[in-house]
Amino acid sequence: MKDVFESVRAAEKRLQPAFAHLEEVALQNEKRVLDAFRAEPVSPRHFAPTEGYGYDDLGRDSLDRVFARALQTEDALVRPQIANGTHAIFLALSGLLEPGDVVFSATGTPYDTLETAVGLNGSEPNALTRFGIGFRMAELKEAWEEPFDLLAILDGITDRPEVKMLYVQRSRGYAWREAISVDKMEPLFKRVKEVRPDIIIAVDNCYGEFTEDREPSAVGADVMMGSLIKNCGGGIAPTGGYIAGRKNLIERISYRLTVPGSGREVGSYAASYRPFFEGLFLAPHTVLQCLKTAMLFGEVFGNLGYEVMPAGDKPRADIVQSIRFKEPGELIAFCKAVQHASPVDSDVVPEPWDMPGYADPVIMAAGTFVQGATTELSADGPIRPPYAAYMQGSLTYEHGKLALLEVAQAVLAQREAGER
């Protein structure tokens, strides 16, 4: 344990310049969020619950406007009724696309749960392909300095009027790749709009909000989607998701969210809106805690001889830290230790299981106050080669550091047992 403690302390010292940069980004993002609150302005009356149809719901409508400003968009739909990030993405795609339309992914195959929703995996009722909506893609390049295959993307959208949407997945899902930064999105979006000014650029923004000093909307994304139990909820929001973007697109999606003709004008919430407002206000700071924890995990496990992505001190575009193990036992030991180091359900022992929507057994550790919240310390990974854990979250850096001490010790013990 002493050796692990010394390794963590040395890693912390090396990371101080990177931490200072993250703190500056968090300060800029917090100012933008604070300005959004003051521009509306928010008051206690906006926290009040509503019932029935939800006409003239001041809290709901104000929350939409605050989110839109904070995320640098014209408009937003922020709803507790959106179950998760996949639901938000599916709402946006199904609300904007019609039979005969095609969505083109610039980031290859989407993560497992969305494969089912768009119809790439199976043939579930209401999947996009069942409504005649196509899904095409270009794989990302291995040269990460220029991740997009621009020639394949342009070939896939030019003179193809049926392709109505360019889709970008910012985070990695269960792929071994870096998250895509806003800086890397900017030249792609500019070139795409030169060729197809009419195309809708949609970004799955899950895990990426407030990790950089601007959002994809600032460089040309027309619509973005995400979960409130990830970055934007600040560890406070109990549920929900958001869709933010151009006003005309958000209006159209609202008809899919509720019903054509009523859209965003209906939909009440019988609990307080306060956690959603408060969560957004805390989001830049909470994301900072997540990023510092991810950097520390990456630095320490990299020094222990494991392949990590990104490397400890490298720039970040999401809150996820990927760590690749040599055999499944180390991945399982990692997740079990994360669970044991959690404030909730620390006595629970996670095991791999056939989780709905995933192609392989998955092990998940999430001893969280909000079930499955990934701004709280959590880790998961599919039990398939290469055996990679995807660690994210930590409401406080202090908790992340304490957890790392325990997790590293557990993995090293498992490695030594396997070598004997």
Image (spheres, rainbow, N blue to C red):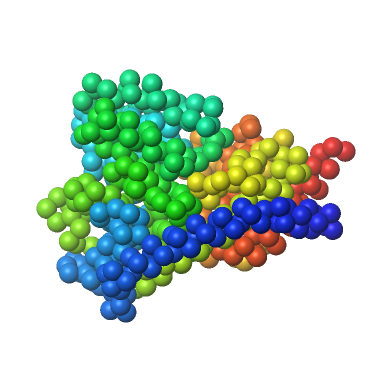
The image shows residue 368 at horizontal and vertical percentages of: 55, 62
| Residue 364 appears anywhere in the view | no
Q: Identify the residue at image location x=48%, y=31%.
A: 147
Q: Identify the residue at image location x=71%, y=52%.
A: 14
Between 32 and 77, the one lying in front of the other is 32
Q: Quadrant of the C terminus?
A: top right
Between 396 and 26, the one lying in front of the other is 26
- Determine the image quadrant of residue 309: top right
Most extreme residue toward the right, as rendered? 420
Most extreme residue toward the left, as rendered? 261
Q: Identify the residue at image location x=23%, y=62%.
A: 267
The image shows residue 73 at horizontal and vertical percentages of: 29, 53
| 303 relative to 239 in the view: left or right | right
Query: Is residue 311 depicted above or below 195 in this figure?
Result: below
Q: Quadrant of the N terminus?
A: bottom right
The image shows residue 31 at horizontal and vertical percentages of: 41, 65
| 14 relative to 234 in the view: left or right | right
The image shows residue 224 at horizontal and vertical percentages of: 34, 47
Q: Identify the residue at image location x=51%, y=44%.
A: 355
- Determine the image quadrant of residue 397: bottom right
| 17 relative to 28 in the view: left or right | right
Between 289 and 266, the one lying in front of the other is 289
| Residue 240 appears anywhere in the view | yes
| 183 relative to 219 in the view: left or right | right
Query: Is residue 192 depicted above or below 317 in this figure?
Result: above
Between 197 and 79, the one lying in front of the other is 197
Q: How many marks?
A: 0
- Determine the image quadrant of residue 16: bottom right
